Amino acid sequence: MRFAVALLALTLAACTQQPAPPAAEEEQISMRVPAPWFICDSINGASVFVFERTANNDVHVAEYGKSDGGLLARNGYFVGDEEGAAGSINTELVRDNGSDAWVHQTNPGMLETPASAYTRPFGSAQIEGRDIQCRWMPRTRVAGFTSRRSFVVHEDAAGAITYSAYNFADNASARAASGAENARTTNASLELRNGVAGQTPEATTYTFETQGFRYVLSLNRDGTGVLDVTRDGAPLTSEPLIGYQQGSPPAPTAATP
């Protein structure tokens, strides 16, 4: 089946087909309004990929390394065939010289709990011959990364909020971890439960506290963000977010009369 679909208008700096040298920190910040199509935090490799798709069906892919969060490459594609089969959607990404990439998305209706798909369930990608398996968590409120770690803020079935961090320094020892409700992830470096969501005129916030440590994730209205950590009120670290995406519960299905 060959057709093109227009999704959210997304932006990214002009793409090239050659790897780019590491950029200065302020140049690495790819996340701006509007949001990415999706972020693929590889659970079988050492990179995080930010996929952005424009209203014209151009797709830009930025790859960041888990050694230091540095920008490794930017590549540009356009959407080719989009095929649905067996409860999934395969989207072909092509350049002038032919097919170079695919992304695979599960239809939320095929999940154990369809309503858990707060974010699009992209499970894998093929990029220039590389097989990339993507992290996906049910009821994800936020998934993103800094220069030191990736993270997911997610809910359980009762609505309790958890922060799961995956430190890049631990990536070599990360192993696939089984999860309920079709979760695809690895063992977390840190988990903090009982988070509190908040709103200010400038940002959406998530706050987690344990043993004197306070983690505050701020998602600013302009699409930037920061993770601040303090201990007994003293600042420990402040990490700008390189990229993130937010999720929300799907709209309820109207009852059939």
Image (cartoon, helix red, strand yellow):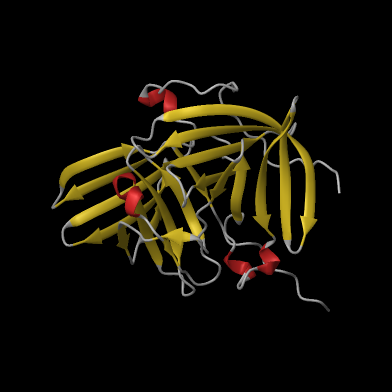
Give the residue displayed 58% in from the left and 38% down from the top: 51
- From the viewer's side, name the closer residue of 252 and 20: 20
- From the viewer's side, name the closer residue of 180 and 35: 180
**Residue 48, image x, y percentages:** 47, 41
**Residue 237, image x, y percentages:** 23, 41
Q: Is residue 32 visible?
A: no
Give the residue displayed 48% in from the left and 43% down from the top: 244
Q: Is residue 82 left or right of residue 243?
A: right
Give the residue displayed 86% in from the left and 49% down from the top: 1
- From the viewer's side, name the closer residue of 159 and 104: 104
Q: Is residue 100 visible?
A: yes
User: With respect to residue 145, does 29 lie above or below?
Assistant: above
Q: Residue furthest front?
A: 129
Give the residue displayed 65% in from the left and 46% down from the top: 103
Query: Which image quadrant: the C terminus?
Result: bottom right
Which quadrant of the view contains residue 121? bottom right
User: With respect to residue 75, does 132 lie above or below?
Assistant: below
**Residue 119, image x, y percentages:** 58, 55
Which quadrant of the view contains residue 6? top right
The number of callouts visible is 0
**Residue 38, image x, y percentages:** 58, 45
User: With respect to residue 85, does 144 lie above or below?
Assistant: above
